[in-house]
Amino acid sequence: MSGRVSRAAYFLGGLLIAILQAFPLYRFTLVAEGTPESEFWSMLFMAAFLVSLWSNIALAVKRLHDLGKPGLAAIVLFVPFVSIVAFLVLCLFPGQLGANRYGKQTNAPM
């Protein structure tokens, strides 16, 4: 949770997380409800969601650090609809140039 990450790295990381979550969800929609196969895909989706949750939070915290904001502001990612706006803000607004209190430069460990 230390360091900073750029807009591009944040967007690409978020895209990868979304793809990893979408695949088992897509497969779940293709099988009949109540079958062992549907239970397998639903459990795989839940596992992918829980594993990617940490990655998503870590990316958001590092992106907030790049903007010079505290990582605790990542809580807004859990608010429905606000999280979409927060994701767009984190993807579009440029970070602080040079060093800040969270790191020397973007994409470098602290």
Image: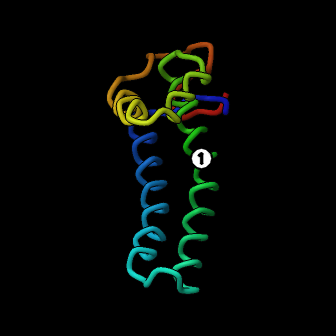
Q: Position of residue 72 (x, y in %)?
A: 62, 22
Disc 1: which residue: 55
49 in relation to 104, above or below? below
107 in relation to 100, above or below? below
Residue toward you, 109 or 23: 23
Residue toward you, 14 or 99: 14
Could you tell whether 29 is left or right of 53 in the image?
A: left
Q: Position of residue 98 (x, y in %)?
A: 49, 16
**In which quadrant of the rendered view does residue 40 lie?**
bottom right
Q: Position of residue 86 (x, y in %)?
A: 41, 29
Element assignment for label 1: helix
Q: Residue at x 39, y 39 (%)?
A: 8
Q: Residue at x 53, y 75 (%)?
A: 41
Q: Position of residue 68 (x, y in %)?
A: 52, 15
Q: Residue at x 59, y 48 (%)?
A: 53
Q: In which quadrant is the N terminus drawn? A: top right
Residue toward you, 48 or 69: 48
Give, as a three-letter code, the residue at label 1. Answer: Ser
How packed mark 1 is, by other alpha carbons closer than 10 Å (few <14, some 14-19, many 20 or more), is some
| Colour scheme | rainbow
Q: In which quadrant is the C terminus drawn? A: top right
Q: Residue at x 63, y 54 (%)?
A: 50
The residue most toward the front is 34
